[in-house]
Amino acid sequence: VEVGPVAHGGHCIARTDEGQVLFVRHALPGERITARVTDGEEGARFLRADAVEIHTPAKDRVPAPCPFSGPGKCGGCDWQHAAPGAQRRFKGSVIAEQLARLAGLSPEEARWDGTVEPAPGDKVAKGEVPAWRTRVQYAIDDQGRAGLRKHRSHDVEPVDHCMIAAPGVSELGIERREWPQIATVEAIAATGSHDRQVILTPKPGGRLPIVELDRPVSVLRIGEKDGAVHRVHGRPFVRERAAGRTWRVGDGGFWQIHPKAADLLVEAVMQGLMPKKGDMALDLYCGVGLFAGALAERVGDKGAVLGIESGKRAVEDARHNLQDLDRVRIEHGKVEQVLPRTGITDVDLVVLDPPRAGAGKKTVDRIAALTPRRIAYVACDPAALARDLKYFREAGYGPRRLRAFDLFPMTHHVECVAILDRVTKDA
């Protein structure tokens, strides 16, 4: 088949002679390939496939640096076979396609220059891989070997080294030991501290091994009956460093995976919002309080910041992290439930960093009803961002600026920050 454009999800689009759509991994636009169907039935709307032979390679193709990358192997990386600059172009084309299809916005209307910016220090040459991933979840096979899952599969590809794992993860030596009776091992290497943590999920009825790794590490486990995180030894949290503060993140809670991401996103959000002394601000889906803390520093003693977060442990951490700032309050609960109960009728600024599915129309309408001066939307999925931008547009808010960041090199994932303000009816 002839390979067409990149699609959202780390694959390219091709068509069979009969016109059936193929979502092909390990291919690049413009190539002529032999594709092996991996998923789907005859007559289905589309099929999934792998490129197993490249007849006409694209100029952006490089030999995959990772020996575990390729058809039928590890599913963690989507673009090992593409040059770094090409990866960013592909991500840019996906963002543009999602904006057009789901939001009806051109890049110009979205106030986006069309580029995907690399994180500082991530510009590497062809054939090189940045080691950026500070959190890696290893799957354990039946022989107790650590590996990573194959694409859309529970099968495990054993690995002796993950090239995108940050040095703090690699130095633990998880791939070099056996893990009997364990289903998964999540490794966390904090940024800005030497804290290292592993979170073990035993197989049903399995016992925890004695964990002896190559560096000091705290150990947590996932309870078989309650699914909760329990401390085995060491601290139940890691200390991250960003935006001039130290952040406690407990129980493997959410934190940006790229070591430069937290500072980069705070800078983009604050530059876009331009907070003023005395502003009232909301930080929705606030996690451990990263944006709330940055806002509080800028709105001053006469300002106020309200954070809302659904994760109980994250709320505890946020309150601990920001306890020196009296002007910050953190509420526990789902945004769509808590926000109406606050009694707040207007605010100056809003930051929202929703989960991958996005905020949704109901929450967007609730935010717009507060008539904020500006809104910063941090998005890890361009499709969800585009859908919510459409809802914001219907509610009277449009993009003032959009930036995209390549915080997940070698994968199809991309982070965006959209700054919104009120638009006139004819805009």
Image (cartoon, helix red, strand yellow):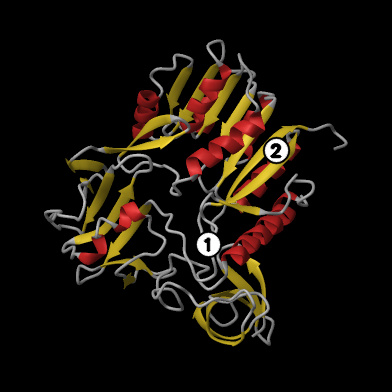
Q: Residue 392: which numbered mark, if any?
A: 2
One can see residue 147 in this view = yes
Badge 1 crowding class, 10 Å Cα cut-off, few under 14, some 14 to 19, many 20 or more, is: few
Where residue 341 appears, as percent x and y from the top left, is 52, 21
Q: Quadrant of the N terminus?
A: bottom right
Tell me the quarter of the picture where residue 139 sits: bottom left
Residue that appears at 37% across and 51% down: 135
Kindly report which numbered mark, 1 or 2, lies closer to the viewer in this rendering. 1
Q: Quadrant of the C terminus?
A: top right
Vertical side of 55 occupied by 213: above or below: above
Check disc 1 and report its element: helix, strand or loop.
loop
Q: Farthest residue in the right direction? A: 426
Q: Given the image, on which type of amino acid does mark 2 rest?
A: Phe
Where residue 320 appears, as percent x and y from the top left, is 35, 24
Check disc 2 and report its element: helix, strand or loop.
helix
Badge 2 crowding class, 10 Å Cα cut-off, few under 14, some 14 to 19, many 20 or more, is: many
Q: Farthest residue in the top direction? A: 302
Residue that appears at 40% across and 17% down: 324
Q: Is residue 9 left or right of residue 3?
A: left
Where residue 147 appears, as percent x and y from the top left, is 31, 67
- To which residue does mark 1 refer? 124
Vertical side of 189 occupied by 149: above or below: below
Residue that appears at 54% across and 25% down: 295
